[in-house]
Each structure stands twice: as C-alpha cells, then as structure tokens.
Image: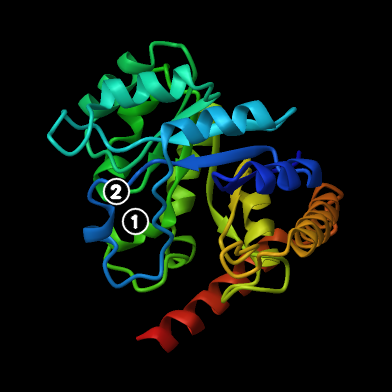
Amino acid sequence: MALKLMYITNRPEIAKIAEKAGVDRIFVDLEYIGKELRQKGRDTVKNRHQINDVERLKKSLNKAEVLARVNPIHKETAEYSSSKEEIDGVIAAGADYVMLPYFKTASEVKEFIQYVDGRAKTVLLVETPEAGEIIDELLELNDNDEFFVGLNDLSLGYGKKFMFELLEDGTVEKLTEKFRKKGVFFGFGGIAALGKGMLPAEYIIREHYRLESKAVILSRSFCNTEIETDLGKIREIFETGLKDIRLLEEKCNNHEFDLLENKKQLDEKIKLIRDGIR
C-alpha cells in the first residue's frame, strides 16, 4: 500500500510542483464558517479559497485529483450562499471529491449526500465528538466513499491541548477499527517532513500503517509557501520530502519495523509533549 498524500493550496504553480513530486490530491479549502471562533488561539491554517480555485487547479493538473472542502451544512444568509449552491459550484468546477467538515448529526450527512447526488465522491471529515458517536450509523448509510479523521477540531472537542493525544488515548484507534471492519477508505491527520515537526513524521506514518490508514495531509510545516516563496526551493522540498516518505513506506510494506514498538514510542513522545504544554 501507499498513502494517498494530500496538500492544501489554491495556487496552480504550487499544485503542479506537488503533483510532479507525487502528491495524489490537491486540497482546496473553502471552509471558513465558524472556524475562526472555534479555533481561536490555535496556530491553525484558516484558508479562504474560492470555488473558481477548483476550476483553475483542475485545468492545471494532469493526474492529481482535486478535493474541495466545503463549509458545514448551512442555509443561505446575506453573507454567504447555501450549502446546496456551494456544493453545486465546486462540482461544476470539476471537484473529484467533496468533503463535509464539522458535522454532528446523521441528518447533516444525509443532506450533504443528497446535495452531492453521486456527481462526485464524498469524504466525511470526522472532527466532532458527536460525529464519533454516530460512526456506526454513518457507516450503514453506504453512500459515503471515504472518511477522514480531523485531529485538530476533534482534539478541541475533547478538550485536548495537543491534537496527537487522540492517537495515544485510543480515540483514533477505535474509529479506525470501525472503518476497517466496514472496509471503507479512511485517513487521518497531517504530517511534516521526516525528522521534523513537534512529533516526528516517521512515527506518525508508521502508526498509519499499523492502523491500516490510507491517506494523510502534508501539513503546512511540510512546505509553508507563505514563508518559502522561491519555486525552485519549493520544488526541492517536495521532491526530497516525498522521496523520503515513500522510502519509509517501502520499509513499512516490507515489515522492516515493529509497529507495536513504534506505537509505544509514539505514545511516550506524545505524553512528553502533552506534559510540556500543560
């Protein structure tokens, strides 16, 4: 297996570099409704991509898929269009996948599926405790193509200080066990380049393999294009970073690691970080 790697950008020149290096999906992020309030004080990425970004990226890419994260289910107001209009827009623009964030009820998911109406694949972003509680019900809908566990908001929902605590406390494992039993495609979280990040990416990738996850996001710290603006250096970051990730994955596929031992080491590192934050 090889993880589906996703990268968030609305810039065609960056998307082309990512695609050529081996990124599987370009992630367009339209979500903003309620996000600023619930993530206040957190060093998180808050994008304001537009529907026309989907079309621009789709036209610029050769093989990478385009995933569009829309806003949570909402009605039309004076400030923004309705969920139906937004979903119709990203599909018309060429989105291969439409992701629903921050839902809490099955009725929201059913409404989302109805709006997509089979015109694109759907991804349910599980990032509220309430969503976690109804996973069994969602899995019985049989209309959802993929699930993704969003560690940032989900950790906030559980009152955690560090999002990867959800790997240590069993929350992610319980969810992924349900996904595996149902045979659905799923992923979780994000990673930096190997050897970098508060929690080194190699430990997280090996945990993806232990849990049989299929997808992960390359985080802002993997390549922050707001800081690094030279396209040549950005290209080098992607080429080197993805080569390292794929080599590590090859070792995972060849069973060169004790994944249970990695889990123990991962938990210890998470506890140290958590205690340092508190």
Quarter of the image with the N terminus in it = top right
Q: Residue at x 80, y 42 (%)?
A: 20
Which of the 4 quarters of the picture holds residue 144? top left
| Left or right side of 196 for 47 | left
Counting the numbered discs, the total is: 2
| Mark 2 crowdedness (10 Å alpha carbons): few <14, some 14-19, many ≥20 | many
Mark 2–mark 1 contact, CB under 8 Å?
Answer: yes
Residue 129 vertical position relative to residue 146 in the rendered view, above or below: below
Q: Is mark 2 on a helix, strand or loop?
A: loop
Q: Which residue is drawn at 39% across and 41% down?
A: 30
Residue 122 vertical position relative to residue 40 in the rendered view, above or below: above
Whole-percent x, y for residue 234 in the image? 73, 60
Q: In this orientation, which residue lies closer to the viewer: 25 or 93? A: 93
Whole-percent x, y for residue 38 in the image? 24, 59
Circle 2 residue: 128
Circle 1 residue: 153
Which of the 4 quarters of the picture holds residue 248? bottom right
Q: Is mark 1 on a helix, strand or loop?
A: helix
Whole-percent x, y for residue 97 in the image? 51, 27
The amino acid type found where label 1 is placed reads Asp
Q: CA separation, marks 2 and 1?
A: 7 Å
Whole-percent x, y for residue 69 in the image? 42, 37
* Precedes in sequence: disc 2 or disc 1: 2
| Mark 1 crowdedness (10 Å alpha carbons): few <14, some 14-19, many ≥20 | many
The amino acid type found where label 2 is placed reads Thr
Quarter of the image with the C terminus in it = bottom left
The structure's colour scheme is rainbow
Residue extending farthest to the left is 78
- Residue 66 in sight: yes
